[in-house]
């Protein structure tokens, strides 16, 4: 194929994520006219990363982080959007990496992108850890925003497989969690305890109305 064909084919593959609705919101039966797509999540997490980077003056390569985040869901164009409750992290990495390799081998052949995704998943560099924190925090913020719109009824979750997961059930029973987003933020709390800035942001999100 020509370079032009490779570029357009890669773009069209990525374009799939504009219409790929985030699975977690569907499973929680979020009642809203428009529910976030994977592409919208990618945009949101990039903007969150920019804000956190400049406000807290992180010593890292922001360009690398933004590029990493721009492609960190690329595998979902082929395998779909799995939640952490659908498949093990190890299995998701395996099939995800195979999908990434296939996409890039058939289009723009960018080893740098494949390496960035592997780096993101391994979470051993400061850029990958920062990107991971932003990815998880953005989902928590979106959860809080949906909750503030009263889009989730905890009494209508009989068909939701996540509702029966043991840690989720414990957080639901926790009397300190008054709302759906309280429960979900508490569930994710441990993901941010290794960075005081993200821990502070987590506390702010949990304790304040965001709009």
Image: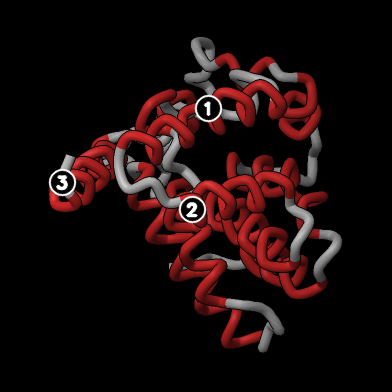
Q: Earlier in the sequence, mark 1 or mark 3?
A: 3
* Numbered circle sitting on residue 98: 1
Position of 74 relative to 189 (above/below): above
Q: Are marks 3 and 2 in contact (CB under 8 Å)?
A: no
Considering depth in this image, is 170 or 34 the residue closer to the camera? 34
Give the label on residue 28, or none.
none
Q: Which image quadrant for residue 206?
A: bottom right
Q: Position of residue 101 (x, y in %)?
A: 48, 34
Alpha-carbon span between mark 3 and mark 2 = 20 Å
Is residue 208 visible in the rendered structure shown here? yes
Task: Return the x and y of residue 205 as percentages of the image width and height.
Answer: 62, 64
Of labels 1 and 3, the one closer to you: 3
Q: Residues within 10 Å of mark 1 (few under 14, many from 20)?
A: some
SS at circle 3: loop
First in sequence, mark 2 or 1: give its number: 1
**Residue at the (77%, 66%) spot, across then down:** 199
- Residue, disc 2: 113
Marks 2 and 1, Cα distance to the nearest angstrom?
A: 13 Å
Rate crowding at label 2 as few (under 14), some (14 to 19) or many (20 or more) other CA atoms within 10 Å.
Answer: many
Q: Is the C terminus in the top left, top right, bottom left or bottom right quadrant?
A: bottom left
Q: Which percent across, then down, holds residue 116?
A: 57, 54
Splitting the image into 4 quarters, where does residue 85 fall? Answer: top right
Q: CA distance from mark 1 to mark 3?
A: 24 Å
């Amino acid at each position: 194929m020509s370079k032009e064909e490779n570029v357009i084919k890669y773009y069209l593959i990525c374009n799939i994520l504009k219409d790929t609705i985030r699975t977690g919101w569907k499973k929680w039966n979020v009642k809203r006219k428009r529910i976030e797509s994977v592409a919208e999540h990618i945009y949101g997490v990039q903007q969150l990363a920019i804000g956190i980077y400049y406000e807290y003056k992180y010593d890292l390569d922001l360009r690398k982080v933004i590029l990493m985040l721009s492609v960190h869901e690329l595998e979902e164009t082929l395998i779909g959007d799995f939640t952490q409750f659908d498949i093990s992290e190890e299995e998701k990495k395996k099939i995800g990496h195979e999908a990434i390799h296939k996409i890039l081998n058939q289009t723009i052949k960018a080893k740098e992108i494949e390496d960035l995704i592997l780096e993101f998943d391994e979470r051993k560099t400061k850029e990958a850890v920062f990107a991971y924190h932003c990815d998880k925090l953005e989902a928590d913020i979106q959860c809080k925003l949906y909750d503030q719109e009263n889009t989730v009824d905890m009494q209508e979750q009989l068909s939701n497989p996540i509702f029966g997961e043991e840690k989720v059930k414990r957080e639901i029973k926790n009397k300190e969690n008054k709302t759906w987003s309280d429960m979900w933020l508490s569930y994710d709390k441990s993901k941010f305890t290794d960075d005081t800035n993200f821990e502070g942001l987590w506390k702010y999100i949990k304790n304040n109305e965001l709009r």
